[in-house]
Image (spheres, grey):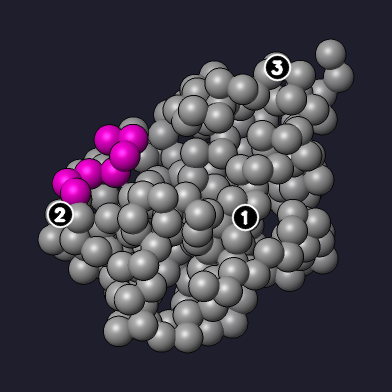
């Protein structure tokens, strides 16, 4: 699988230049859902259902044109989980010629203390954070849309309605599999005036929530460096 990896600076430059783009990440939870495996995400944040599975598959089968980037988790990791080959086969049958971007660009930069250039770009834009209650504490959040920490898919329509109330902004999504569906559905009407970006769990440690294993290795110094704070 050919995966483009333009790097963090590329995304920050787009934000700084006012060049809109959307970005949706597909990790092992999304592929379990697409492939009909398992009953929930690995973190337990979302139970799978037939309507969510259909909606998730549709995000891949109905192509979005323009600056709409589909991003994939580490192919090496997906291979170790036994997901890469069946995912490739599914794509060949259902969504051929899909163009993929590196889905770990934000997470890796955060872990390594190199996320500041992106955070700075977000600070310069009106940023709407869509996520669980603890993300309300993010210092660059100009507006906040609450999603339930578990099984937010049931509220997808109400969440979309709240996002639609904003224009000319960056929308930061942290809503599990529902984020992909939201971005896919909102892009045709919002993609020209706003950024729709799936950040997943990247912001959790900045709000005292270490929801992923690598978050435990993120020291206070790394977090403050990414936020641009001095100790």
Residue 143 lies left or right of residue 221; in this view the side is left
Residue 31 lies left or right of residue 12; in this view the side is left
State the predominant SS element of the stretch in magenta: loop
Observer able to see residue 207: no
Residue 66 vs residue 9, the one in the foreground = 9
Q: Position of residue 137 (x, y in %)?
A: 57, 26
Q: Residue placed farthest to the right in the image?
A: 230
Vertical side of 75 occupied by 228: above or below:
above
Label 3: which secondary element: helix
Q: Position of residue 134 (x, y in %)?
A: 47, 26
Quadrant of residue 228 within the rendered picture: top right
Mark 1–mark 2 Cα distance, whole angstroms, equals: 29 Å
Circle number at residue 49: 2
Identified at 82% across, 23% down, the residue is 229
Residue 86 lies left or right of residue 206; in this view the side is left
Mark 2 Cα within 10 Å, few/some/many (few <14, many 20+)? some
Quadrant of residue 61 within the rendered picture: bottom left
Identified at 74% across, 41% down, the residue is 115
Mark 3–mark 2 Cα distance, whole angstroms, equals: 38 Å
Residue 111 lies left or right of residue 186; in this view the side is right
Mark 1–mark 3 Cα distance, whole angstroms, equals: 26 Å
Q: Earlier in the sequence, mark 1 or mark 2?
A: 2
Q: Earlier in the sequence, mark 3 or mark 2?
A: 2
Residues at discs 1 and 2 in contact (Cβ within 8 Å)? no
Residue 64 vs residue 210, the one in the foreground = 210
Mark 3 Cα within 10 Å, few/some/many (few <14, many 20+)? few
Q: Position of residue 44 (x, y in %)?
A: 27, 35
Mark 1 Cα within 10 Å, few/some/many (few <14, many 20+)? many
Residue marked by disc 3: 220
Q: Quadrant of the C terminus?
A: top right
* Magenta extent: 38-44
Circle number at residue 170: 1
């Amino acid at each position: 699988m050919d995966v483009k990896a333009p790097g963090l600076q590329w995304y920050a430059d787009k934000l700084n230049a006012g060049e809109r783009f959307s970005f949706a990440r597909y990790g092992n939870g999304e592929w379990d859902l697409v492939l009909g495996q398992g009953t929930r995400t690995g973190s337990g944040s979302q139970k799978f259902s037939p309507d969510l599975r259909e909606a998730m598959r549709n995000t891949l089968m109905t192509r979005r044109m323009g600056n709409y980037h589909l991003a994939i988790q580490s192919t090496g990791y997906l291979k170790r989980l036994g997901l890469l080959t069946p995912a490739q086969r599914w794509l060949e049958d259902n969504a051929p010629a899909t163009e993929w971007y590196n889905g770990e660009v934000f997470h890796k930069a955060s872990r390594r203390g190199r996320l500041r250039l992106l955070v700075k770009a977000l600070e310069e834009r009106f940023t709407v954070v869509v996520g669980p209650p603890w993300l309300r504490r993010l210092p660059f959040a100009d507006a906040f849309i609450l999603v339930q920490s578990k099984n937010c898919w049931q509220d997808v329509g109400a969440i979309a309605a709240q996002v639609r109330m904003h224009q000319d902004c960056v929308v930061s999504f942290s809503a599990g599999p529902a984020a992909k569906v939201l971005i896919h559905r909102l892009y045709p009407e919002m993609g020209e005036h706003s950024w729709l970006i799936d950040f997943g769990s990247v912001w959790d440690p900045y709000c005292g929530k270490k929801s992923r294993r690598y978050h435990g290795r993120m020291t206070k110094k790394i977090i403050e460096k990414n936020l641009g704070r001095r100790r």
